[in-house]
Image (cartoon, coloured by chain):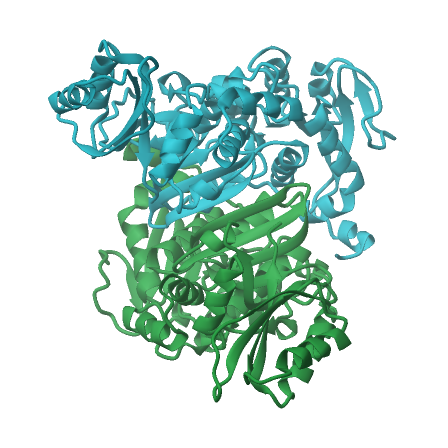
Chain colours: A green, B cyan
Amino acid sequence: MPNTDKELRLSTGPDLTIAIAGLGIVGAETARQLVQASDRLSARAGRCLRLVAVSARSDSDRGFDRTGIAFESDALALARRADVDVVIELIGGEGGIALALAETALQAGKHVVTANKALIVHHGQRLAGLAEQARVRLKFEAAVAGGIPALKVLREGLAGNNIRRVTGILNGTCNYILSEMTNTGRGFDDVLAEAQAKGYAEADPSFDIDGVDAAHKLSILAAMAFAEQIDFGALQVTGIRQITDTDISYAGELGYVIKLLGHAQPQSPATVQPCLVAKTGQLAQIGGALNAVEFTAEPVQTVLCTGPGAGAGPTASAVLADVIDVAASRGGLPFGMRVGQLARATQKKDKQARRYYLRLMVMDETGVLSAVTSILRDQQISVESMLQKGQSDDKPVALVLTTHPTAPDQIKAACSSLSSARFISGAVMALPIVDEA
Amino acid sequence: MPNTDKELRLSTGPDLTIAIAGLGIVGAETARQLVQASDRLSARAGRCLRLVAVSARSDSDRGFDRTGIAFESDALALARRADVDVVIELIGGEGGIALALAETALQAGKHVVTANKALIVHHGQRLAGLAEQARVRLKFEAAVAGGIPALKVLREGLAGNNIRRVTGILNGTCNYILSEMTNTGRGFDDVLAEAQAKGYAEADPSFDIDGVDAAHKLSILAAMAFAEQIDFGALQVTGIRQITDTDISYAGELGYVIKLLGHAQPQSPATVQPCLVAKTGQLAQIGGALNAVEFTAEPVQTVLCTGPGAGAGPTASAVLADVIDVAASRGGLPFGMRVGQLARATQKKDKQARRYYLRLMVMDETGVLSAVTSILRDQQISVESMLQKGQSDDKPVALVLTTHPTAPDQIKAACSSLSSARFISGAVMALPIVDEA
């Protein structure tokens, strides 16, 4: 590395002064990096980056040297400080103080960097409009896929492409749970409890395991990929609560693993749902709490990026990249074009035929197979393979089928008929089988 | 997508005018995209992108509408045209006309975009200096890993990190050959001949299979990762000619596949060499002609990007991203900091202990194993496992060993002793076993 004096002497602009609101694990790590790696970061930024103020609930020690750094107990005060160029919002929450801080900072002509996906999903377009008016930056790389620079890859690295498809493993908690279930054969509740004990899942895990977190990230990716307004309400979201060890095991026998995938295409509604992916493909190898984002586009074909989707270090990496982009006047408009240019989200209908995995809990009695297959036949659904194991006189047993490519409407109708059949116990599970590009 | 009129009306800058030198498959594809997808590309760029001139050896049809696009038989004339803002150099070659064009264009105050790795490796620093002086951009995303925006990810997406390690599958031809050998059990010459017939390998394949192409890309990545001057001569490069089907098969039995990996760390010389990687890791899954670049860094941990490393579409994607960055005034300095700030390359010595795979062709006679193991013991090399199959009275048979972590000097000394032993036939093959981060 070049020596410090030379680096700083060659910095090209005035200092860039930074404030951080929120000193949780991400905020504290970001502050620590800005203080301890100031020379290296400034060299990369082309100007001196200076943390001048922080705000948090309590003024306690967070593991970095606070000399010369002001403390504000009111986060909004950061947005009003004359000595601050960039406000980093790491408070969280879709509204409240985070929103007020972002608005106030942008209106005061300060750049805003945030890791807050809920904020961007629900208010990102309006905030981007404020940033345009004030001619400042609004950046949120850390809001999607943690340490993977997914938004930069999409918005800039693939800017020359017509994006055909975005597929992502966007929630580390779900990926950890499904990977553990796959590797150990254990059940969902068991693995979830362990994940909670290890800190990989929240005490209230619904935000992750019901797919909401992944849906937030996907809706931001989809807006940028297709130059459309964010339309969170239009997403079709299914989480992983219904996935049983039986599903994992049957999928494995068929040559697949189950992953919670976000999936967006220009003419279909974006979906977050558990899917079967081939064991031999790249997505199946993304284990543990990793995230992955795959872009299929013309003319590049397919680019896949994987990395840690959460955690203090990876998230701080994304926040710092945004700050350095601001310092270097890089990155342009928040969504890659003006908010007024983003197409209005239109209602889309999913018509794409896919292969499906169907799992039914059936009573083990004469005539059941015939009844199931005739319901499928009535919907013109063609069965590719069928698996049934175990026998029981009094308890339902799992019957698993895979179909040839079938339209979503057909599958829905078939599931509805099956669910109401006398010999079926509980809901019918239908998971798409996703072939990699 | 927004409608065309609206897109263009909202463009923020004056037109950006573009010239392409070289209309081979990449040049023709780039031109075709600029002409046919002009509206979409201009919307992403925030200003109208206009292809105004091209140069090629012959003025023949290349599959795009040439209306209004000037033709120059002399590429240098593009650099002198007053109506050109950006010159895209796709002629190739480390010197000659490509170099003259880049120099002339930069000196004339034009931005230069190139896919030419040899040019950047041998003249990139001087050209970057010219670009700094002229306050224009020099961009070369397409020079490394084709369609993967690897340089952008490194220089900008991971700008907040201290890069600890760069590992890459950087040559699609080698990866295709090794993958085919692994999947089919066929020999090197056989697969190479097929790759040549299919167009995956050149008639003279040495540039690819001897590792030179991968080394070009790695030296650019290393310079950017560690803020050092490019030092191509210091790279230690071994190609894949010596890899036999026996190696592939023994590696497979040990749980590994063989990949040609580029590898750079701050304190070690960068290497390109065949390595063993675990079958269950992510790198082992990168099959066919794909490329992959993995960055291990603090605080992000590890980010891996994969995609097509060559071909008209992927390369055009990278060229177009550079052009759009130029249009949007993004991307900053070519190497992420001023040329004068790049540290002088220093001589580095590889001291890192690694596990090794050793393959020797030995005469199948009494006392050979004892002789081999005593040579290893003399170098304090500890054997982890040993495999020998087949017997022959008159032909040498393969003996394969894996070692516990061993310093490079020890391995070199052992290989040298072994190679000169009476009972060993031919060179000893020593391949590092790389554990993924």
Is the C terminus of chain B in the top left, top right, bottom left or bottom right quadrant? top left
Image quarter of the N terminus of chain B: bottom right
Q: Quadrant of residue B63?
A: top right
Residue B238 occupies which quadrant of the picture?
A: top left
The mark tally for this picture is 0
Is B346 drawn above or below residue B172 in the view shown?
above
Residue most extreme to the right:
B67
Residue closest to the eye, B318 or A197: A197
Task: Name the residue nearer the viewer: A118 or B6.
Answer: A118
Q: Indicate left or right for B197 with A258 as reference.
A: right
Question: Residue A198 vs residue B202: left or right?
Answer: left
Say which residue appears at 68% left-offset and 29% top-offset. B26
Question: Residue A378 location in percent, x, y?
Answer: 77, 77
Furthest residue in direction front, as rendered: B393
Whether residue A108 appears in this view of the structure is no
Residue B399 position within the rendered picture, expressed as x and y whole percent measured from the top left: 29, 25
- Asked if residue A75 lies left or right of residue B289, the reply is left
What residue lies at 73% left-to-right and 40% top-to-bottom? B14
Side (left or right) of A53 relative to A235: left
Kindly tell me whether residue B275 is visible in this rendering.
yes
**Residue A324 image offset from top left, x and y in percent:** 44, 47
| Relative to A407, residue B33 above or below | above
What percent of the width, then of the height, locates residue A256?
Answer: 52, 59
